[in-house]
Amino acid sequence: MNQYDVVALLEDLPHEGLKRGQVGTVVEEWEPGVYEVEFADTNGITYALVALRAEQLMTLYWHPDPLLKTA
């Protein structure tokens, strides 16, 4: 995972007010495998800023990977 990657949460975090599937952006890597993720609404207003482990997240992609495409 890299800074500014768009990610989806893989588990509910009720103490943070977050549910599985919510989308956020990686804003910082605190240590290997631990990332600060910002969750914001469609107006760009942040509603959660949480440190999460890589296994709690899935990177989202907006375009096909040419290496995986079969002819």
Image (spheres, helix red, strand yellow):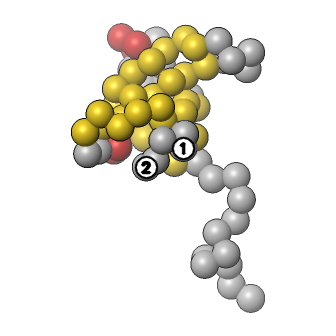
Q: Is residue 21 above or below residue 55?
A: above
Q: Furthest residue to the left?
A: 31
> Mark 2 to mark 1: distance in Å?
7 Å
Q: Amino acid at mark 1?
A: Asp
Q: From the viewer's perspective, is 56 left or right of 7?
A: left
Q: Is residue 49 above or below residue 33?
A: above
Q: Furthest residue to the bottom?
A: 71
From this viewpoint, is residue 53 visible?
Answer: no
> At x 55% / y 11%, what residue is drawn?
47
Residue 65 in percent (x, y) is at 64, 69
Q: Amino acid at mark 2?
A: Met
Mark 2, residue position = 1
In the rendered image, which quarter is residue 12 located in? top left
Label 1 crowd bin: few (<14), some (14–19), many (20+), radius 10 Å: some
In the rendered image, which quarter is residue 36 located in? top left
Do the CB atoms of the residues marked 2 and 1 lie less than 8 Å apart?
yes
Residue 31 in percent (x, y) is at 25, 39
Residue 52 in percent (x, y) is at 34, 31
In the rendered image, which quarter is residue 71 located in? bottom right
Instruction: Tell me, for residue 27, which label it has, or none.
Output: none
Q: Secondary structure at mark 2?
A: loop
> At x 58% / y 48%, what residue is drawn?
60
Instruction: Tell me, for residue 5, which label it has, or none.
Output: 1
Q: Secondary structure at mark 1?
A: loop
> At x 41% / y 33%, what residue is drawn?
28
What is the total number of numbered labels drawn onto the structure image? 2
